[in-house]
Image: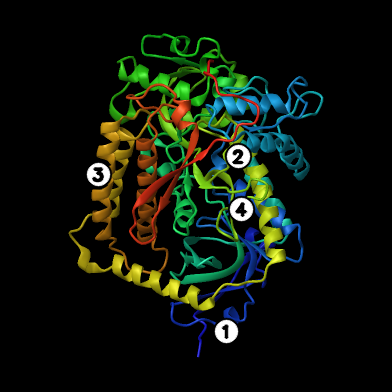
């Protein structure tokens, strides 16, 4: 006889604001007993979104337009604590506001050129055509855009842009977007399953069962049945740990879950290193800083970008500026030492009142983390891992679906590919709006057209497997083995120094060997905490496993791509090679052997033939 292990009330609607509502329920079990209500399918979701950032909540909103569907958002944090909240500069879209001469075609070309021609041009056209519409939708939802005197929202010019097209709220564009979307989710009665760490997507062959997760508050394992799942879990910047602008939650969970059910990791080697993170800790100082007039200066007082991008200077694309800064540091014209070495970003020529009006967060971050008042003195900065152009392959950008039936992808964990080898500043928030919307529509239509075909028994077996993993990892007999932080620190050094801004064959080969050794240590890793309530030690253990798999994919993709393109810079192959590498990398992980293999897929060219990028 099945027994109910625990019964909890979802945070639903206004409950997220502190009001307890008896709405949907979910159940947990120990892997051996399944509640009767789960067996009957009473808690089966039509659309289950994993991740509560911009892409996840926009997808949930789109799906919830079909009022007959049950829609939920699962997050390992709480809503509004995603990486999207950290985006600062704005969101691109042609709106005819600040510059009436801007066109969709111009946005398309800037994106393709900025992506070093690795973008799928049909996808970019789809994206650019809808970006402006989604900005107007967000405006209608109540987003507090910075306004012009005529009341229309203001737009600014970012790196690689031919026109000012980034709409924004101060330098807190992502924060305002996430809160605006969250308000709309509450209004539309979407369930939020908070503080639940997704562990896997459960499949039987080509049939989707749902998602396995751990409730961090109790340690209970959850099997949540779903007709469709949207993976919107963000990026994996914590592969580089202290040299990233990403939050601690950006550990590639969704990408690994997708790879493990057969979705390839597309273009993993294409990691964007943002040029201006605080040298002290990698915290991002927005590209809007340079858009507003901040200058890059080396220790000799030289405005060095004239050597690297004489036309665009500080507003060249991110990959070019990041490599310029790294070169200045390597050649002894930087300040500081080791992993914290950098150059200066100088705001002192910008009026203080404009800094406080448009760059308030940059000012605050510089004061808090570097002890610098940017209205009075320059602040030390250095490249920081910021964004993953690669991600789970989106098989159809018209629907957001992957190659696995019932599984959809959106946001930074996906690869459409509209960013190619280097994302333009302010295209990320636009992407989460456009393709979050698309994936939500696609998953909703799939759910309407299909019945639940999953297996409750399979969900139970998966929970049982994870219970065994928990027991094994937290066994006290593992004292003396390497701990999670020790293995993680070794991984970080491998990735930053051997697969970072600059790469070559010897270092990448060494990185691959070092990651293999870390895999073996991870198998016997000592977690040390066997409690069930908020066991963050086990959470970090799971995340480390995900980061190691992501690291392998980055290194394998980087080894195979014997050229330099966008964010991928090989010292031993410094030129772009369109004859051999105008194609996407697809990294698969074999379920039986655990080995990685690469396939390739041609880039879609519609009208823009590749040519040399010059800024």
Q: Are marks 4 and 3 in contact (CB under 8 Å)?
A: no
Vertical relation: 503 (above or below) 45: above
- Residue at disc 3, secondary structure: helix
Q: Are marks 1 and 3 in contact (CB under 8 Å)?
A: no
Q: Depth-wise, is mark 4 or mark 1 nearer the camera? A: 4
Image quarter (top left, top right, bottom left or bottom right) of the C terminus: top right
As drawn, the label of residue 174 is 2
User: In 3D space, how far apart are the residues under numbered discs 1 and 3 (Cα atoms)?
Assistant: 49 Å
Residue 351: name its quadrant. top right
Circle 1 crowding by C-alpha within 10 Å: few under 14, some 14–19, many from 20? some
Mark 4 or mark 2, earlier in chain: 2
Mark 4 or mark 3, earlier in chain: 4
Q: Depth-wise, is mark 1 or mark 3 nearer the camera? A: 3
| Residue 162 in picture, x, y percent from top left | 65, 19
Does 511 sit left or right of 407 as displayed? left
Does 218 sit left or right of 480 as displayed? right
User: In 3D space, how far apart are the residues under numbered discs 4 and 2 (Cα atoms)?
Assistant: 25 Å
Mark 4 or mark 1, earlier in chain: 1
Q: Are marks 1 and 2 in contact (CB under 8 Å)?
A: no
User: In 3D space, how far apart are the residues under numbered discs 2 and 3 (Cα atoms)?
Assistant: 38 Å
| Residue 559 in picture, x, y percent from top left | 34, 36
Circle 2 crowding by C-alpha within 10 Å: few under 14, some 14–19, many from 20? many
Q: Depth-wise, is mark 2 or mark 3 nearer the camera? A: 3
- Residue at disc 1, secondary structure: helix
As drawn, the label of residue 513 is 3
């Amino acid at each position: 006889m099945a027994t109910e292990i625990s019964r909890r009330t979802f945070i639903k609607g206004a409950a997220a604001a502190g009001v307890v509502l008896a709405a949907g329920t979910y159940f947990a079990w120990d892997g051996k007993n399944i509640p009767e209500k789960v067996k009957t399918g009473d808690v089966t979701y039509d659309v289950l979104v994993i991740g509560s950032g911009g892409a996840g909540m926009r997808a949930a909103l789109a799906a919830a337009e079909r009022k007959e569907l049950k829609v939920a958002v699962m997050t390992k944090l709480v809503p509004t604590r995603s990486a999207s909240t950290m985006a600062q500069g704005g969101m691109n879209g042609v709106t005819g506001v600040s510059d009436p001469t801007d066109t969709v075609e111009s946005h398309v070309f800037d994106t393709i050129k900025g992506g070093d021609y690795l973008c799928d041009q049909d996808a970019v056209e789809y994206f650019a055509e809808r970006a402006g519409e989604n900005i107007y939708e967000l405006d209608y939802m109540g987003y507090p855009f910075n306004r012009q005197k005529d009341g229309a929202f203001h737009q600014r010019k970012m790196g690689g842009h031919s026109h000012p097209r980034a709409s924004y709220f101060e330098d807190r564009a992502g924060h305002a977007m996430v809160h605006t979307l969250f308000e709309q989710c509450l209004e539309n009665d979407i369930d939020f399953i908070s503080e639940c760490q997704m562990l896997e997507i459960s499949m039987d062959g080509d049939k989707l069962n749902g998602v396995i997760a751990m409730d961090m508050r109790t340690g209970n394992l959850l099997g949540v049945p779903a007709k469709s799942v949207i993976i919107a879990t963000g990026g994996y910047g914590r592969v580089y740990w202290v040299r990233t602008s990403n939050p601690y939650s950006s550990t590639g969970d969704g990408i690994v879950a997708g790879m493990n059910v057969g979705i390839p990791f597309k273009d993993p080697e294409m990691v964007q290193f943002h040029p201006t993170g605080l040298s002290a800790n990698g915290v991002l100082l927005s590209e809007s800083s340079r858009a507003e007039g901040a200058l890059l200066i080396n220790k000799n007082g030289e405005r060095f970008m004239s050597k690297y991008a004489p036309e665009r200077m500080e507003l060249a694309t991110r990959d070019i500026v990041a490599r310029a800064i790294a070169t200045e540091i390597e050649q002894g014209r930087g300040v500081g030492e080791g992993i914290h070495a950098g150059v200066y970003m100088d705001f002192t020529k910008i009026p203080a009142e404009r800094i406080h009006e448009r760059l308030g967060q940059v000012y605050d971050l510089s004061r808090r983390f570097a002890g610098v008042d940017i209205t009075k003195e320059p602040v030390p900065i250095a490249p920081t891992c910021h964004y993953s152009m690669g991600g789970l392959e989106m098989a159809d950008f018209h629907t957001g679906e992957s190659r696995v039936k019932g599984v959809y992808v959106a946001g930074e964990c996906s690869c459409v590919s509209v960013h190619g080898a280097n994302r333009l500043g302010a295209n990320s928030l636009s992407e989460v709006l456009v393709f979050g919307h698309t994936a939500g529509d696609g998953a909703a239509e799939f759910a309407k057209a299909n019945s639940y075909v999953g297996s409750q028994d399979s969900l139970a077996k998966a929970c049982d497997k994870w219970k065994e993993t928990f027991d094994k990892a937290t066994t006290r007999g593992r004292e003396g083995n390497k701990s999670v932080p020790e293995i993680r620190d070794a991984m970080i050094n491998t990735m930053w120094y051997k697969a970072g801004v600059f790469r070559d064959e010897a270092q990448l080969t060494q990185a691959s060997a070092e990651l293999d050794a870390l895999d073996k240590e991870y198998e016997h890793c000592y977690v040390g905490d066997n409690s069930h309530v908020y066991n963050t030690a086990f959470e970090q253990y799971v995340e480390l496993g995900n980061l190691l798999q992501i690291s392998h994919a980055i290194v394998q993709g980087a080894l195979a791509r014997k050229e330099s393109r966008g964010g991928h810079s090989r010292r031993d192959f410094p030129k772009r090679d369109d004859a051999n590498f105008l194609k996407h990398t697809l990294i698969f992980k074999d379920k039986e052997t655990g080995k990685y293999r690469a396939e390739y897929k041609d880039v879609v060219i519609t009208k823009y033939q590749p040519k040399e990028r010059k800024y």
